[in-house]
Image (cartoon, rainbow, N blue to C red):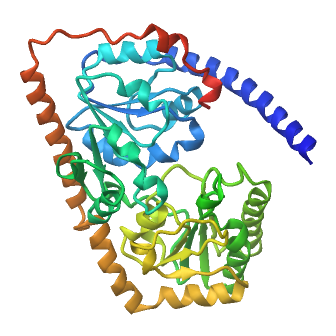
């Protein structure tokens, strides 16, 4: 078994190297086709050091950032070739490919970035954060009660844009000597103002069930994924009723660690295809597209794992079920929404189906949900959270100007770091 696993890893490594070399050639060709960036135009940078597999973290910010760019021009800084290629194709914002530290420094000197946003905690964030005279701001890629949301890494950033009271209370339990009033700015969930899009089906009398599980996790404490424990039986039961329409949106990393988890994911996709072939009017959906919005707004009931998807759906204020992890080491927060949510235990398909029907039509459960929506996001009236986001950015810009005026006579230090450039990792590690 160990020998087979080693061989599988070796083959994967060889394929990754070949793929990344091809990606390098492709991205260089794409850059040659693009006009150069207008100098000194962009005031906000969005730093993304991950490969394309984690682009979902950035995609959810496309629409809010595109709207913000109408006032404050925004530039995405991509460190990985695979991600850059996808961004060139799909991003509504301009993209700078900055594989090397030298490339990053060139863009920094050619632009006037006052604020730099970060959507994750990639270790390479520190290659950008060493540049002063700008605010480094953690905006995250979703609200949740996962361990990730209470990391002491928040302190590394000048500011953090958080969702609301629940996020602040969560952090207050962990972060010592942190100025929450200044550095943690609540904005709600700007993405919720963009929960829209073209439906890939024709609405009818069928009840739409969104099943959006996360990946299997890389350790027991984070083993929240339900595809193998709940998903196959759950989806099969929903497909067989004739009164439900399934929208299946698995995490893009599903199966990257556990081969059997990946096999369960493929089994669900195949079952959906078979159900549609048997009854084309069913219009079940396997959703692997980049856009997230219509799924959250259109579903009559959503079933998600412990992940940011819980809170993405919570912001919509509609019926919601959380799968209960089966791994004994999975860490479950007991102080927030998960202490009062509607759980879905793993079991036989008919039992899980009955639970879905119960929650989908439970008026009291929906009323209880309203309390948690307010606690996590504040006022969710359409447009309000976008206003808070823009106000936060305006505040950061004003603070930048205030400090720039105070230090106008200071000598600017050359940030160039030859050692960092010489020791930077290869692009293969990024993609």
Can you say which quadrant of the picture contains the C terminus? top right
Q: Nearer the viewer, residue 120 or 352?
A: 120
**What residue is at 36 percent from the left and 45 percent from the top?**
154
Left or right, 37 with reference to 359: left
Q: Position of residue 85 (x, y in %)?
A: 55, 29
Look at the picture and state if 83 lies above or below 387: above
Which image quadrant for residue 221? bottom right
Quarter of image, res 126? top left
In the rendered picture of this protein, how many numbered marks are placed on residues?
0
- Vertical placement of residue 257 versus 226, above or below: above
Q: Residue furthest front?
A: 176
Residue occupying the point 36% across, 80% down: 369
Say if residue 36 shows up in the picture: no
Q: Position of residue 180 (x, y in %)?
A: 22, 51
Q: Quadrant of residue 259?
A: bottom right
User: Seen in the image, is 275 located left or right of residue 285?
Assistant: right
Task: Judge whether residue 257 can be spotted in this image.
Answer: yes
Indicate the position of residue 307 as horizontal and vertical percent values: 51, 61
Q: In this rendering, would 128 be left or right of 381?
A: right
Residue at the image point whose x is 60% and y is 76% from the top: 245
Judge from the rendering whether residue 272 lies leftward or rightward of residue 380; answer left or right: right
In front of the other: 311 or 150: 150
Identified at 28% across, 18% down, the residue is 111
Relative to 263, is 23 above or below?
above
- Residue 35 place in picture, x, y as percent: 41, 16
Q: Nearer the viewer, residue 266 or 368?
A: 368
């Amino acid at each position: 078994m160990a020998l087979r696993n080693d061989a599988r890893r070796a083959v994967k490594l060889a394929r990754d190297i070949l793929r990344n070399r091809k990606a390098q050639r492709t991205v260089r060709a794409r850059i040659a086709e693009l006009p150069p960036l207008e100098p000194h135009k962009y005031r906000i940078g969005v730093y993304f050091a991950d490969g394309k597999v984690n682009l979902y973290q950035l995609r959810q910010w496309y629409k809010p950032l595109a709207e913000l760019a109408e006032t404050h021009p925004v530039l995405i800084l991509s460190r990985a070739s695979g991600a850059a290629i996808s961004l060139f194709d799909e991003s509504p914002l301009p993209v700078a490919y900055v594989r090397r530290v030298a490339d990053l420094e060139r863009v920094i000197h050619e632009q006037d970035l006052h604020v730099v946003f970060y959507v994750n905690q990639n270790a390479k964030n520190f290659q950008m954060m060493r540049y002063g005279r700008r605010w480094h701001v953690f905006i995250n890629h979703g609200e949740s009660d996962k361990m990730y949301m209470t990391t002491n890494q928040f302190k590394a950033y000048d500011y953090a844009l958080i969702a609301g009271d629940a996020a602040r209370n969560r952090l207050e339990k962990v972060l010592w000597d942190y100025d929450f009033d200044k550095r943690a700015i609540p904005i709600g969930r700007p993405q919720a103002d963009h929960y829209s899009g073209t439906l890939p089906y024709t609405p009818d009398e069928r009840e739409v069930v969104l099943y959006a599980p996360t990946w299997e996790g890389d350790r027991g404490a984070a083993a929240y994924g339900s595809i193998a424990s709940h998903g196959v039986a759950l989806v099969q039961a929903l497909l067989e009723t004739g009164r439900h329409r399934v929208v299946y949106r698995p995490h893009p990393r599903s199966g990257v660690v556990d081969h059997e988890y990946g096999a369960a994911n493929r089994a669900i996709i195949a079952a959906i295809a078979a159900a549609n072939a048997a009854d084309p009017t069913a219009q079940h959906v396997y959703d692997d597209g980049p856009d997230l919005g219509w799924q959250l707004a259109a579903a009559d009931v959503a079933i998600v794992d412990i992940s940011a998807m819980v809170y993405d759906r919570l912001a919509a204020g509609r019926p919601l079920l959380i799968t209960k992890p089966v791994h004994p080491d999975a860490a479950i927060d007991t102080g927030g929404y998960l202490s009062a949510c509607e759980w879905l235990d793993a079991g036989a398909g008919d039992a899980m189906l009955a639970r879905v029907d119960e929650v989908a039509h439970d008026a009291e459960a929906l009323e209880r949900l309203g309390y948690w929506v307010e606690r996590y996001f504040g006022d969710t009236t359409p447009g309000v959270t976008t206003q808070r986001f823009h106000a936060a950015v305006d505040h950061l810009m004003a603070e930048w100007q205030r400090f720039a005026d105070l230090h106008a006579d200071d000598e600017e230090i050359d940030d160039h770091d030859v050692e960092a450039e010489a020791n930077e990792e290869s692009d293969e590690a990024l993609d």
